[in-house]
Image (cartoon, rainbow, N blue to C red):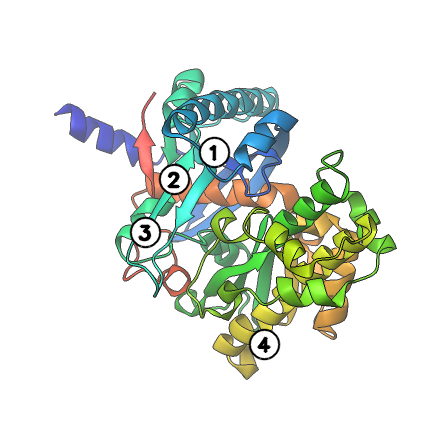
């Protein structure tokens, strides 16, 4: 048997019963790790979160990742440095699992998205770049690492995002009702989960924590990076003129499938130009309050305009289940509950899954399916022409 065929057999072996997902989001807060256990019975995959942890980035590393433009040398160094960070987070998570008698069989690393340029009607150029060298992780842990999940979807015409809808459907599909899975990270995205997999709708709504965090940094002259518990926003007043500017970005008028990131909504191309256009300095609390209101309005308006309509009036969501850092912001959550009215807005914690762990756990699920040789993109969400097996595999 050749080395290639041995590797293939090893990759698709049924022994992959426990995986570690690693994720760094657009808010650049740090690395999330989630240990997930898998079981299959009668053709149905079930996944259970065992443990999770967060490793915050240093303020310097966060500043570099939020920069928006890098030289080739900086990208090279960042890729390696983040690979070593991810490797150390993985080693610690594996050690914690081992103390509880859990053996991790593989790692699924989303890495950190430095650049994401999906194809649109305005351009035929596309590409995506996630950094955090998987070879560093594989060597440090001596485990196979699945990485680079987004590229394969893009080769068949997809946006390469969002990819979490597969896990949303696996966990939250209900036989009698549609639910929305709303993830509020740097970018907010929604999955409209139906009973039938082929009817799942998902897309990036627009900026959320990325906008609020940028407002906090500007308001506090970088002394703070986030609005803890929504405290600043709760004390401020909303500026109608700035709110109007922020909620009239061209991305918000594009129909799904669509995805976005720092290229459209980084502080230097979104909030800072909006403040210059506003031509008036706002009180710190007012700036943060306006950014928070803009995030809530974008989530509500984009959701009502596309996820609700595309699902059809009869399929309006019976519940909106929120994950991500935004679920920890009472001011933002309060505004969402007010905007969505009678539709219950709960958190994923209410369903037994810590909000911060969800995306890392979702990529563990995608990694498991890759190792099983099964597709896990959602063509109805990404716009891909067909379902494909995601990711690249790095052996230890």
Q: Mark 2 to mark 4: distance in Å?
A: 35 Å
From this view, report whether residue 318 is shown above or below residue 217: below
Instruction: Name the residue that disc number 1 marks.
Output: 18
**Sequence-wise, which precedes: disc 4 or disc 1?**
1
Instruction: Name the residue that disc number 2 marks.
Output: 129
- Dividing the picture into quadrants, the one containing residue 8 is top left
Q: Mark 1 falls on what kind of element?
A: strand
**Sequence-wise, which precedes: disc 2 or disc 4?**
2
- Residue lying at the far bottom of the rendered structure: 313
Nearer the observer: mark 4 or 1; the answer is 4
From this view, report whether residue 89 is shown above or below residue 216: above
Q: Is residue 116 left or right of residue 124?
A: right
Q: Are marks 2 and 4 in contact (CB under 8 Å)?
A: no
**Quarter in which the C terminus is drawn:** top left
Residue 370: % across, % down = 34, 42
Instruction: Name the residue that disc number 4 marks.
Output: 316
- The residue at 71%/53% (across/down) is 350
- The residue at 37%/44% (across/down) is 128
Q: Mark 3 to mark 1: distance in Å?
A: 34 Å
Nearer the observer: mark 2 or 4; the answer is 2
Instruction: Name the residue that disc number 3 marks.
Output: 126
Q: Mark 3 to mark 2: distance in Å?
A: 11 Å
From this view, report whether residue 59 is shown above or below residue 329: above
Q: Are marks 3 and 2 in contact (CB under 8 Å)?
A: no
Q: Mark 3 to mark 4: distance in Å?
A: 33 Å
Q: Determine if residue 173 is in view.
A: no
- Residue lying at the far left of the rendered structure: 1
Q: Mark 2 falls on what kind of element?
A: strand
């Amino acid at each position: 048997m050749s080395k290639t065929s041995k590797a293939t057999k090893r990759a698709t072996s049924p022994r992959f019963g426990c995986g570690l997902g690693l994720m760094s989001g657009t808010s650049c807060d740090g690395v999330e790790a989630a240990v997930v256990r898998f079981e299959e019975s009668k053709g149905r995959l079930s996944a259970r979160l065992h443990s999770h942890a967060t490793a915050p980035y240093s303020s310097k590393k966060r500043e570099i990742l939020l920069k928006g433009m890098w030289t080739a040398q900086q990208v090279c160094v960042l890729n390696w440095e983040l690979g070593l960070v991810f490797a150390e987070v993985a080693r610690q998570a594996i050690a914690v699992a081992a103390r509880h008698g859990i053996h991790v069989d593989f790692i699924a690393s989303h890495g950190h998205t430095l650049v994401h340029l999906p194809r649109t009607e305005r351009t035929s150029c596309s590409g995506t770049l996630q950094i955090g060298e998987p070879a560093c992780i594989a060597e440090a842990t001596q485990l196979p690492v699945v990485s680079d999940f987004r590229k394969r979807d893009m080769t068949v015409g997809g946006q390469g995002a969002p990819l979490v809808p597969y896990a949303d459907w696996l966990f939250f599909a209900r036989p009698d009702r549609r639910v929305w899975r709303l993830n509020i990270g740097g970018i907010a995205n929604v999955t409209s989960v139906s009973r039938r997999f082929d009817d799942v709708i998902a897309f990036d709504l627009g900026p959320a924590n990325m906008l609020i965090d940028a407002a906090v940094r500007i308001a506090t002259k970088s002394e703070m990076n986030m609005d803890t518990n929504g405290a600043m926003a709760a004390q401020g007043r909303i500026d109608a003129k700035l709110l109007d500017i922020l909620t009239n970005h061209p991305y918000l008028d594009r129909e799904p499938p669509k995805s976005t990131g720092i290229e459209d909504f980084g502080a230097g191309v979104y909030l800072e130009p909006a403040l210059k256009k506003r031509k008036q300095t706002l009180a710190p609390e007012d700036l943060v309050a306006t950014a928070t209101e803009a995030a809530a309005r974008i989530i509500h308006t984009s959701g009502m305009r596309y996820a609700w309509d595309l699902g059809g009036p009869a399929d309006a969501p019976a519940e909106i289940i929120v994950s991500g850092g935004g679920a920890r912001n009472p001011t933002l959550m309060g505004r969402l509950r007010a905007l969505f009215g009678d539709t219950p807005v709960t958190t994923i914690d209410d369903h037994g899954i810590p909000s911060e762990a969800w995306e890392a756990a979702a990529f563990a699920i995608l990694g498991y399916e890759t190792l099983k040789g099964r597709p896990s993109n959602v063509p109805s969400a990404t716009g891909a022409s067909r379902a494909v097996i995601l990711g690249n595999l790095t052996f230890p």
